[in-house]
Every structure is written in C-alpha cells, then in structure tokens.
Amino acid sequence: MAYQHYRTWGIFLAQENRGEADQLFFIFTLDFGMIEVLAKSVRKLTSKLRSGVTFFYLSEIEFIQGKHYKILTDALPLEKFENIRQDTAKVKIARGLGAVTKFFLIRSERDLKIWALLKDSFNYLNSQPGELIQPYFFWNFLGLLGYLPELYRCPLCQKKVKPEIFYLIPKEGGLVCGHCASGLEIDRNEREFIKVNTVKLIRMFLQKPLEVLTRLKVDQPDLENLVKVSSFMLGSFQEFKNAI
Ligand SMILES: [Zn+2]
C-alpha cells in the first residue's frame, strides 16, 4: 500500500520521548497548522532524521499519515536560529513561544497569520535583543485566536481606561477600574494590577508591526509590569484549562 507523502515547512516547538528510541514532535507548519509527528528511531545515532529535528529549527519536513500517528520521513533544516541558541536568555524566550503555541493549539488548521507571527518572532529574536518579543508575540497570538480581554473600557461600568488604578481580571472580561474592582468579591490571585503604560504597550503591540520593537525604549518597572501581567493572563487560561 502506497502512502501519500506530505511536504511542508515547520518550526519544531516541543518534543516528547516515546518508547526506546522514538520521539513525538509538535511542529507548527505552514500548510497544516500544529501537527504531532512521530519520528521513529530518531534517538539512534544512525538516524538520518536527526539533523533536521532539533528544537525550534525551521525545517522542510515530509511525513505520511500512519494508522495512529503522522510519521516523519524527512527533515531538512532551513534555518537554525544560531544566535538564539548561543544565548541562554533567548533560548528561554524561544521555549516560551513554543510552550504558548503548543498550549493553545494542540492540533489546528492551516493559519497563515499565526505562521507569520511565529516565524517573524523567531527571526526577530535571532537578530535583536529579546525582552519585548515574548509579550509582543503573546498578545498578538491571543488577538489572532480571539481571546483578548477588553482593553479600552471597564466591562462593569464602561469607564474608559485612563491614568488611574486598573486591574486585569480575566473572569470579568478585561481591565476593571479600581472602583468596580473594590466592590468585587474575588481572590487576590484572580486579579493583577496593570499600569497604564502596560495598557499602552499592549495596545501598541496589537496595532503595530513587529519592527516597532526595535525603536521602543521601555523602563524597567514598566517592563516588569508588562511581563507580570502577560504571565498572569497566560496563567488564567491554564487555570481554566485545569478546571475543565
Ligand atoms: Zn468600572
């Protein structure tokens, strides 16, 4: 029986060991979105696949649809992102991009916007200082999936977000003003204080192309709040997922 071979480009985002020498790869691809592909015997030194399957390589891959899994039959590295590999801080960011993508898209359809966001983010990380790319990626990624919280008005009183106290409260739908937040019976871990500058940065990320980051100077306290709010937002999805 002849199998159809599928060829596409993909970025290797995560992997799990299977059996004695196999690995299951999570690859975001140009043509099929996120796929899981089993690479047989890839942990053996003699495997011809080994050169193309390293974490966050952009590779040209070929696979067949097996009975239970897609099976990797070829992987040719196109871009190894060497500058990321030589910098442990950048490797950590790359892992973060991969983890977020895998978390939301265990399996998905072809999505050229997410493909472009992911590939451009890796290219950016490979050539520029990396601290803003993770939040830029994260908020745009949420936007493409339609998961953004309300960022312009308090969902409870409809007041516009302006320089005063606001909290990000995902279960209320977005940025809640200090007045409304004080009347809510919620746990401390269900809200996060958000600086006005963080709100401005997130809105800018959602409106501007990636290149805006090269011209952006962000103070350390603002950067810390941005990182904290972003990981809080991600955490709220994880809790949601754990609860169902
Ligand atoms: Zn309000």
Image (cartoon, rainbow, N blue to C red):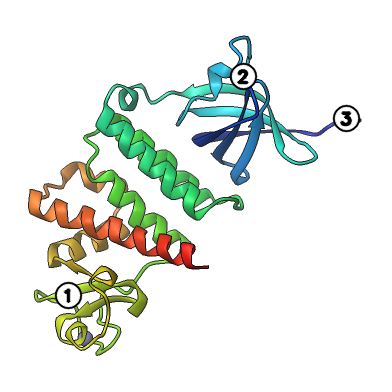
* Residue drawn at (39%, 44%) of the image: 97
| Residue 23 pos. (x, y %) | 60, 29
| Residue 153 drawn above or below residue 111 | below
Instruction: Decide: few, some or many residues near mark 2? Use Cα within 10 Å; few <14, some 14-19, many ≥20.
Output: many
Q: Quadrant of the N terminus?
A: top right
| Residue 39 pos. (x, y %) | 65, 27
| Residue 148 drawn above or below residue 124 | below
Q: Is residue 166 visible?
A: yes
Residue bearing mark 3:
2
Element at label 1? strand
221 sits to left or right of 62: left
Which label sits in the foreground, 2 or 3? 2
Question: Total number of numbered labels?
Answer: 3
Element at label 2? loop
Q: Which mark is residue 237?
A: none
The amino acid on which the numbered mark 2 sits, given as a three-letter code, is: Leu
| Residue 139 pos. (x, y %) | 34, 57
Which numbered disc flags the more N-terminal residue, 2 or 1? 2
Disc 2: residue Cβ within 8 A of ligand 1's nearest atom: no
Which numbered disc flags the more N-terminal residue, 2 or 3? 3
The amino acid on which the numbered mark 1 sits, given as a three-letter code, is: Phe
Residue bearing mark 1:
166
Q: Nearer the viewer, residue 71 or 32?
A: 71
Label pair 2/3, CB-CB below 8 angstroms: no
| Residue 213 pos. (x, y %) | 22, 45
Q: Which mark is residue 49?
A: 2
* Residue drawn at (63%, 9%) of the image: 46
